[in-house]
Image: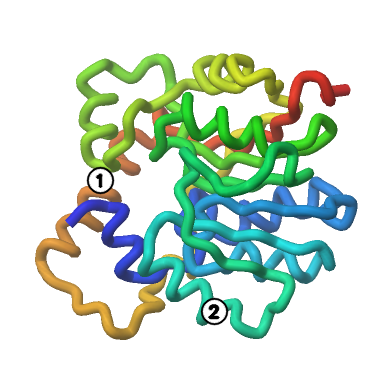
Amino acid sequence: MSYQQLIANLGIGYAHPGGSDTTKKWTEELDISAFSHILEVGCGIGETAKQLTRLTNAPITAIDHDEQMIHMAKTNTHHYPQIMIKQADVHQLPYADQSFDFIIAESVLSFTNTSQSMKELARLIIPQGTMVFVEMTASDTLTDADKQLIEDFYDIPSLHTYEEWASIFRQHDCTIQHFEYLDKQLKGEWLQKNENFQWDEDAFETLRTHQIINATYHDQLAAGLYVVKPSEGAT
């Protein structure tokens, strides 16, 4: 069982580094009420979208490519009329140019073809808009073999350093306005929310490997908070 399959099967509420504490951090650092059209990419079961409703009355479009996640997200956000859940692929999104002034992706871009996913997000954001990304950020001391091991386990196309993330954003005319390293430790959210899921040895082995990788590469595999703006709108 892959790591992504395990997360989807369990129905984890906040699977990104730092869990709800990370989401709370950036929501407190930004004025969420200033945004009028919000897109969350990789919404999972909808917990971040729900958290945003406490801070804004703006419509929130929350997408995920995983059908199982979408089903759980729709159930989880049923009583939140400002949240619209939609199954969609970040590499080809069904929205017009400059449809959003705020875009969020928590532990999503690393699992995509960043050239295509960032092209789409740069297309969708307005010139004065803001994007928040929470992403795995590798140390340049990682060996090629170590990087390959991590990429293979998490099924990610390429593990990026801060400099490489900055270059990816620049290629799409975007600039990092703020960056900080995050506490990767998940709190109580790493709990089984899908009561129908049956643990087996394959699932336990995936979880153990995830924990071993995080312990082994604790100082070389970080989590970064990136606040990014289109270059023409940067101040």
Residue nearest the observer in this picture, 112 or 106: 112
Residue 210 in the image: state x and y as whole percent.
28, 49
Q: Are marks 2 and 1 in contact (CB under 8 Å)?
A: no
Residue indicated by mark 2? 76
Asked whether residue 8 is in view, the answer is yes
Residue nearest the observer in this picture, 3 or 96: 96
Location of residue 118 by image quarter: top right
Residue 212 in the image: state x and y as whole percent.
25, 46
Residue pictured at 32% horizontal, 42% vertical:
215
Relative placement, left or right, of 105 versus 83 is left
Residue pictured at 60% horizontal, 40% vertical:
133
As drawn, which residue projects farthest toward the left?
201
170, above or below 28, in the image: above
Location of residue 191 by image quarter: bottom left
Residue 100 in the image: state x and y as whole percent.
74, 46
171, above or below 206, in the image: above
The amino acid on which the numbered mark 1 sits, given as a three-letter code, is: Ile
Disc 2 to disc 1, C-alpha distance = 31 Å
68, above or below 205, in the image: below
Residue nearest the observer in this picture, 91 or 11: 91
The amino acid on which the numbered mark 2 sits, given as a three-letter code, is: Asn
Residue indicated by mark 1? 212
Residue pictured at 18% horizontal, 63% vertical:
204
Element under label 1?
helix
Relative placement, left or right, of 51 versus 65 is right
